[in-house]
Amino acid sequence: MAGAGRNLKMPDLDKSRFVELIPELKDWNNGGGIDIDSWIQCEGDHKHLIGYARIFWPSFIEHDQCVFFHEGFDKETYLAFMARHKNDRTAVEMVMNHVHVLDLFSRSHHEMPTESVVSYIGRQLKEIWGVKLQHDFPDRRFVVSFPEDKEADITQAEITFFQAR
């Protein structure tokens, strides 16, 4: 098995980075803090994990030489976008597959995610969706896009994918 025994460490998974993303970690244990894995064991909810699994490892559907998220695909919407974008399949994939990162969060919470949180989630989804698309469609090439413009409004941060044609 290629890569077996190699210990690959991703910079974004540095445990100290999680304290920046989840500030309450440092408050646990009377201010002594808690590591991310223990915090997940204490606070984790299986229902949320099931929902997030769908986001992090989505199902796709192939339609008319295009690839879309299976959940929410609608043929009428596809036809309308094809007409609007003059049959440009790449443009249609881009628009139909885009997700605003903030739409993944409950609107009932009072706490707005920080720019660091939105960027972290966007980068993780970009990488994971790229792997999943390659897994499901090994003979196709995809672009998964998550622009990280520091000047941009985080309420507009979005991730999308489309085929490189």
Image: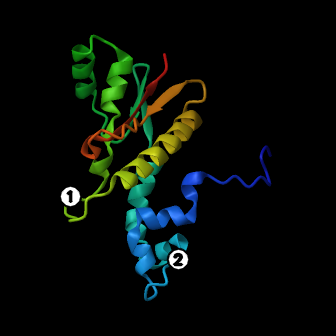
Colour setting: rainbow
Q: At 23% from the left edge and 27% from the top edge, which residue is drawn?
A: 77
Residue 4 on image: x %, y %: 79, 51
Q: Nearer the viewer, residue 80 or 153?
A: 153
Residue type at the position of mark 1: Arg
Instruction: Determine the residue positioned at 66% across, 54% down.
Output: 9
Instruction: Look at mark 2 in the image and give the residue it sits on.
Output: 38
Q: Quadrant of residue 14?
A: bottom right
Q: Position of residue 98 (x, y in %)?
A: 33, 35
Residue beneath the point at 44% across and 19% down: 65
Q: Which mark is residue 51?
A: none
Q: Is residue 86 above or below residue 111?
A: above
Q: Residue at the location (41% across, 56% down)?
A: 52
Displayed quadrant of residue 131: top right
Which amino acid, mark 2?
Ser
Residue labelled with disc 1? 107
In the picture as drawn, the residue positioned furthest to the bottom comes out as 30
Residue 50, quarter of the rendered image: bottom left
Q: Nearer the viewer, residue 130 or 35?
A: 35
Do residues under tags 1 and 2 come within 8 Å of each other at their CB atoms? Answer: no
147 shown above or below 82: below
Q: Residues within 10 Å of mark 2 (few under 14, many from 20)?
A: few
For label 2, the SS is helix
